[in-house]
Structures are given as structure tokens and as C-alpha cells.
Amino acid sequence: MVDQKKFTVSHAPFWHDGSCIRSRSYHTMLAALPAVLFGVVRYGMPAVGVISLAVSSAMIWEYVMNRIMRRDITIGDGNAALIGLIFAMLVPASSPWWMVIIGTFVAIVVAKQIYGGIGGNPFHPALVAVAMLMLSWKDLFDFDAALVNYEFDFAMAYPLAALKHFGTAAVENFTPGALLMGNQIGAVGTPFGLGLIAGGLYLIVRGFVRWEISLSFLAGIFVTAFIFHQADSARYAGPAFHLFTGYTLMGAFFLATEDSSSPVHFIPMLIYGAGGGILTMLIRNIGIHVDGVVFALLVMNIANPLLDKIRPKALGKVF
Amino acid sequence: MTAKKELQLAYAMAIVLLVIGILSYTAFSAKPPEEPVRIMFKVTAGKVLFTHKVHGAESGYGVDCMTCHHHPEDDDAALRACGDCHAHSEKTAAKKASNTCRECHEEGDLESEETPKRSDAFHEQCISCHKENEAGPQECAQCHAM
């Protein structure tokens, strides 16, 4: 084993291509900005509070863990801030402060630092936090109940909940165009579909996320929703509705594509994305939860190492 | 950007956002409106989202406040919340109503201080009005969402 030939590379000097975790984090935050700003304009100060507290507390938890674990301080790379921002985008604007603090604790301490920090986490940290909060304080994630004091000029019912409880007749007014423009209630950063798509495309073009995962996730949702809709159109909404509401677009561009919890090879990426989309629709249509993105992606996160075993055959013979 | 500057930027960002966050939750927190916009009734038979403002607004269903808030009569300024008199369960209904009655009435003034529990009062009020006007949901699952 000692004599085994390792990876052969050319001689030094090497040239760094300039990419770093910091630029990756801040570009992702920049991509999320349209959807975040839309949330701030719509929900006002409560949304500002949730976002500010989530980002800052995530950074503080990271700092505290760095200190406790006697490691280098890593909050400079922006990854903790990014996790805080994504977490804030997934919760209602009326979330109490303690829920935000607990959420970022779970995301940073339980779902990231315990696994050894960035790159070691098997799940998307923000997804773990949201899943834990959703199961522990179900009522706080009921968007209809959380936003009772808001009044806008469109139907004030969370589309996925209305669909689940009252069938497709209750969501006829939610046209794909209206949903894309953010005329729906939801979490701080998820209703504005157009902003999320713009951010997602920016990340894809800049090479920060892989289009294979995003596209296959959306395709998985589209195809599964289409099949269900064809089977019973009174009970199951069509694919356009499911693509532009709930956590779908957030999942496609910001959640499923997280580096350490998603595959790197082409076929595994397609299976991972499509599996996430199919599971999301199964949970939405026949599961107990209103939205399935969080749990579907966590399940696919678990499958990630196994999926990545599907890899191209090495050329030549290995002795 | 050097690692030191990177870290300084992060510290500054964390502190500024923490201050903004605390201020947003305290000094600039949103106050709930005086008149509820919507009310979510969380009950075992499935929660009910009641569009309070739409029911009362002229542009909505235009229901007069006193139609539901029936006591004290003819005094819009003294409207009481339903739960002040109609308690969740029969066990607590008598006590709750009695406490509220004491705010204006002396003990023994009233012939009866009994009030129906909240679910009975709501069912009676909502369904009878919907039936009378042939508008709005009348079946259980049209209001109650599990």
C-alpha cells in the first residue's frame, strides 16, 4: 500500500483560480437578495427582524463553536451567514425570536459543526433546522395562522394548505403568473418565484450550483404532479401550481444544490434531483405534511453518498 | 481581501445585524391591529380560518358587528371578544361568563349567567347565518381543515 501510486499532478508553481468559499457564500446571498428584499417589502419589520437575527445568530453560534472546539474562526467565509439567511427565508415573518435562535443553533451547531464544519455536513444545515422546528412547533409553521394579521390584495390562504384541505377548486385563483409574481403568502423568502428563478439562474451561470440538480428536481416535481393531476384533477393540482408555490423554487436552487450534501457525478445528480422532486410530490399529495420539500431533500441527502458511488468506470486496468 | 479583513467584515456584519434584529423585535415590532384581520381557531375537529375583516367590511359581506358581538347591545364601542363569555369547554364556561358578567353586573342581578360554550355558539351562529343567506360554507369540512 505504501508504494501505491497516488494522484499524479504537474510540477509547481500552481496558480489559484481565485475561487474561495467567501465569494461563493456572498454570491449565493446576492442571488437570494431579490427574494429576500421582496419578503422585506411585503412583511415589513418582522421580516427584517427574522433575517437579521437569523444571520447574526448563525454567525455567533459558529464563532462560539469555533472557540469551544479550539479551531480557527471560520465566520469570515460567510457560510454561517448564508445558512442563517437561507433559514430565515424558510420561516414565517412572524416567527418569534426564540424560534430563530433555536433554528440557527440546530443548523450551525447540530447540523454543521458537530460533523466537523463546512464540507462535513451530510444534510443541508438549514433543512435540518426547519425540519426540527416544523415537527416540534407545528403551529408556528402554519402560514395561515402565522400571518393572520397581514392583508394583501390576493387570496390570503397558503396555497398548499388550501389545496390539501379543500382540493383544487380552492386554488383556482392562484394562476402560475400570480404565483411567480409573489401573489401568495408563505415564508419570508419563498413567495417571489421570479426572484428565486433569477437568483438560481445567476448561480448556475456563475457555476456556483449545478444545473443538473436544479433541473432534475423541477422535472421530478413537474412529471409527478402531472401524473397525479391526470389521475384526479379535482384533488391534485397541476404541475405549474406545484412548481411556483411552497418551497419548490427555493429547494431547486438553494437547498438541493448545497455542496457537501449533494452528489458530484452527472447520473447521481440527476437521480438525486429527480428523487427529491418525486418525493416532494408524494409527500404533498398523499403524505400528511402540507409541503414535502424539506423532508424529501433530507431523505435525498441521506442517499447522497450511495448515489455518488455510481461513477464512470476508470479507463484501463487497475492492478 | 486578506483573512484578517475578511474576519473583521464578518464581525461587523454580525454585530450590526444583531442590533437590527433586536431592535426589530423590540422597539420596531409590528403591533397587532385593533380589529382582527383573520382569526385562526385551533380546535380538535380541525382548525378554522375565519375571515373576520371580510365579514364585517362593507366591501366584504357587510355583516353588522352586533350580529355576532351581541352583548352589550347597541354599543359598538363596548364590543367584547367571543372568548370573553364563551369558554372552550362546558366546565369552564360558567366560571368564565360569570367573571365577565361581574365587570358590569352585581351578583344576583341576572336571572342566568349561563352561556353556551364557544364551539356551540360558533356553530349556531355561523351555520344559521350561512343557511339563512344561502352563502358561505355549511358542511364541516368546508370550514374545518385537519
Image (cartoon, coloured by chain):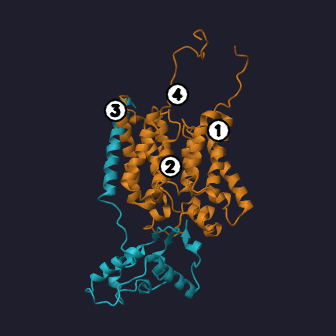
Chain colours: A orange, B cyan
The amino acid at mark 1 is Met
As measured in the structure, the alpha-carbon distance from the residue carrying label 3 to the one carrying label 2 is 27 Å
Q: Which residue is mark 4?
A: A17
The chain letter under disc 4 is: A
First along the sequence among labels 4 and 3:
4
Q: Which residue is mark 1?
A: A269
The answer to whether the residues at label 2 and label 1 have Cβ atoms under 8 Å apart is no
As measured in the structure, the alpha-carbon distance from the residue carrying label 4 to the one carrying label 3 is 31 Å
Q: Is residue A155 left or right of residue B37?
A: right
First along the sequence among labels 3 and 2:
3
Viewer-nearest residue: A30 or B96: B96
Instruction: Determine whether the residue tagged by mark 1 lies in a helix, strand or loop.
Output: helix
First along the sequence among labels 2 and 1:
2
The amino acid at mark 3 is Arg
Q: Which residue is mark 2?
A: A131
Instruction: Determine whether the residue tagged by mark 4 lies in a helix, strand or loop.
Output: loop
As measured in the structure, the alpha-carbon distance from the residue carrying label 2 to the one carrying label 4 is 37 Å
As measured in the structure, the alpha-carbon distance from the residue carrying label 3 to the one carrying label 1 is 36 Å
As measured in the structure, the alpha-carbon distance from the residue carrying label 1 to the one carrying label 4 is 25 Å
First along the sequence among labels 1 and 4:
4
The amino acid at mark 4 is Asp
As measured in the structure, the alpha-carbon distance from the residue carrying label 2 to the one carrying label 1 is 23 Å
Image coordinates for residue B27, horizontal then vertical, percent: 29, 59
The amino acid at mark 2 is Ala
The mark closer to the camera, 2 or 1, is: 2
First along the sequence among labels 2 and 4:
4
Quadrant of the rendering where the N terminus of chain B is positioned: top left
